[in-house]
Image (tube, grey):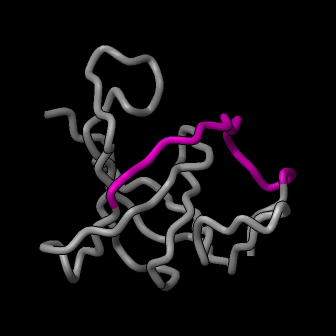
Amino acid sequence: MEPSEGKRRYKRYEYNIPMYLYRMDYQDQYYYAEMKNYCQGGLSLLTNEKLVVGQLVYLEMKNYDEYATGPEKYKSYSGSVKWASPYSSSDGDAKAAYKYGIEYSESAYYQC
């Protein structure tokens, strides 16, 4: 279930950008994901990969750019799945089966 706007601690910014998703238990395999928005505490993403709440993930920016001003200025992020929900787009063009909220870990940003 997605959290309501009233429960948010940080301002959320809409931002659609492709990412690679690595499950911490299977780091040698990545999955396509798309960031939908981000804030100081985490981000939401769409993917076809089934994850569970509490699972640790590593996210790598597909279009990393150290000179960017958005979230792609960091090469990667790590965190845990805070919430999960099935996803279907309103226009019927589903890009992913699931939507997740990822809470950044303490050392979430890795600039390489």
Give the x, y percent position of residue 18: 44, 47
Question: Where is 64 relative to 20, above or below?
Answer: above
Q: Quadrant of residue 105?
A: bottom left
Q: Going 54% across and 38% down the picture, which residue do you hit?
A: 40
Whether 35 is among the magenta residues is: no
In this picture, which residue range is highlighted in magenta? 5-20
Whether 19 is among the magenta residues is: yes
Quarter of the image containing the N terminus? bottom right
Q: Quadrant of residue 94?
A: bottom right
Give the x, y percent position of residue 17: 49, 41
Question: Where is 45 relative to 68, above or below?
Answer: below
Give the x, y percent position of residue 75: 25, 38
Q: Is residue 10 left or right of residue 23?
A: right
Please count the marks in the image. Answer: 0
Give the x, y percent position of residue 28: 12, 73
Q: Going 20% across and 33% down the picture, which residue do you hit?
A: 111
Q: Nearer the viewer, residue 55 or 86?
A: 86
Q: Going 50% across and 61% down the picture, which residue do you hit?
A: 102
Q: Going 13% across and 34% down the picture, which residue do you hit?
A: 112
Q: Is residue 33 left or right of residue 9?
A: left
Q: Is residue 80 left or right of residue 13?
A: left
